[in-house]
Amino acid sequence: MKIFIWIFTLIGVLLFSVAGYVGYSAYSLEGEGVKTTGTIIALNGTHPVVRFVTGEGVRVTFESSLGSSSYTKQLGKDVDVIYRADAPQQAEIGDFISQYLASIIPGVIGLIFTLTGLIPALVIRYRGKKKIRLLQQGRPVKALITDIDVNRTIKINGRSPFRISCQWRNNLTNEHYIFTSENIYFDPRPYIEQQEITVYINGEDIKDYYVDVRFLPERV
């Protein structure tokens, strides 16, 4: 699970870095570049080929890095162009999409990957603090193991984790409570030798609990 989290977070950070670099380059070009007007003279697939004349009178032809089927209807029409005075061959069509789409796409994908990694990491961190708190301050009770099932709402590498369910009766109120353990990423049944398991509960809020599975071996 931790490897999964780190891989997704790392991919997200790398994509964010690419998006930041490309976005900063586009922003710098917009601030420092020379703006003029060019004409779409041809299409290379869906990529427009644009011709313009620099302030020094040099005729430049370039192919846009952004392709779109919409350009097929703009052949022969004028478009805004932006270029660096010292590198006019690296010109771009001067609209927002042409300049920033190359940074938006990896940025959005990077955000998805980063959240996919960070959200589980934050959940694990929260549960870890909750576990420590309940082990230190919670009230231990013995609950009867009622089921060991597979949590099919989660699947990693085609496999779903196990959970231990148990039941405890509050002798003071005669109420029954069902507790469920954290996800266990191996079959715990061979290691369960007793019918009962310890649960640490918050005396003020029984919904705040931790099923003690520390007797299980740790898997690397």
Image (spheres, grey):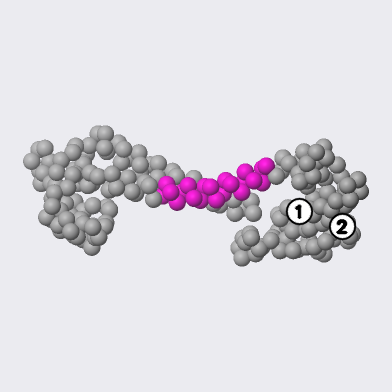
The answer to whether residue 108 is magenta is yes
* Neighbours of disc 1 within 10 Å: few (<14), some (14-19), many (20+): some
Compare residues 58 and 156 and report the one nearer the observer. Answer: 156
Residue 129 placement: quadrant: top right
The answer to whether residue 116 is magenta is yes
Decide which of tag 2 and tag 1 comes sooner along the chain. 2
State the residue position of label 1: 181
Instruction: Determine the residue positioned at 26% across, 34% down.
Output: 31
The numbered disc on residue 144 is 2
Compare residues 2 and 76 and report the one nearer the observer. Answer: 76
| Secondary structure type for disc 1 | loop
Query: Split into 4 quadrants, where in the image is the N terminus?
Result: bottom right
Quick check: 180 left or right of 175? left
Q: Position of residue 18 (x, y in %)?
A: 41, 46
Instruction: Determine the residue positioned at 74% across, 58% down.
Output: 163
The residue positioned farthest toward the right in the image shown: 171
Instruction: Determine the residue positioned at 9% across, 38% down.
Output: 56
Three-letter amino acid code of the residue under disc 1: Ser
Residue span colored magenta: 106-126
Three-letter amino acid code of the residue under disc 2: Leu
The residue positioned farthest toward the left in the image shown: 57
Q: Position of residue 37 (x, y in %)?
A: 14, 43
Quick check: 4 left or right of 181? left
Q: Position of residue 159 (x, y in %)?
A: 65, 64
Disc 2 to disc 1, C-alpha distance: 13 Å
| Secondary structure type for disc 2 | strand
Residue 91 placement: quadrant: top left
Quick check: 100 left or right of 53? right
Q: How many marks?
A: 2
